[in-house]
Image (tube, rainbow, N blue to C red):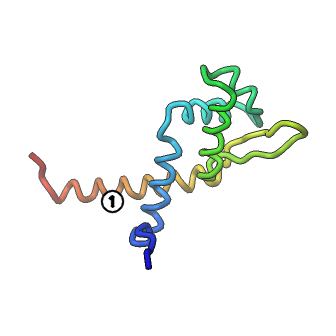
Amino acid sequence: MAYDKREQFSDTEKKAATFAKALSHPARISILKKLAGENKCFCGDIVEVLPLAQSTVSQHLKELKEAGIVQGEIEGPKTCYCINWDNLEEEFNALLEIYEQLKAGKQAVSCC
């Protein structure tokens, strides 16, 4: 019987990897910057400021939403998006914790 090898990693490692993957495209960073400046934002508003098709922006929003960084509410025929600040902070802290662990290891080992 097969098992998920991801179970061998800590929750912090999995959380940091999910967060890093969600931020792994420059369009997603741009989307977050747009959302940070707005109380709420529709997909069409984001399309207006990015050089991407509406379907591409929607796919990036889906990735951010699945990672819990963005949340969306249906308002009539449109979906309104905003940053989930609590989750963003939690995800960032998980990545920061990994960074601190790596940094602590750096002091113990010298490199070429």
Q: Residue at x 66, y 21 (%)?
A: 49
Task: State the image coordinates of residue 11 (x, y, percent, origin top left).
Answer: 47, 67
- Does 111 sit above or below residue 54? below
Q: Is 58 on the left or on the right of 42, as rendered?
A: left
Observer-nearest of 36 and 70:
70
Q: Residue at x 35, y 56 (%)?
A: 100
Q: Residue furthest front?
A: 1
Q: Residue at x 43, y 75 (%)?
A: 2
Observer-nearest of 105 and 14:
14
Quarter of the figure that contains the N terminus: bottom left
- Does 21 sit above or below residue 12? above
Q: Which residue is mark 1?
A: 101
Q: Residue at x 79, y 39 (%)?
A: 80
Q: Is 83 on the left or on the right of 8, as rendered?
A: right
Residue type, mark 1 in image: Gln
- Does 107 sit above or below residue 54? below
Label count reads 1
Q: Residue furthest bottom?
A: 1
Mark 1 surroundings: few (<14), some (14-19) or many (≥20) residues within 10 A:
few
Task: State the image coordinates of residue 36 (x, y, percent, origin top left).
Answer: 66, 35
Q: Residue furthest left?
A: 112
Task: State the image coordinates of residue 65 (x, y, percent, origin top left).
Answer: 65, 48
Circle 1: element type: helix
Task: State the image coordinates of residue 94 (x, y, percent, origin top left).
Answer: 47, 57
- Does 51 sit above or below residue 103? above
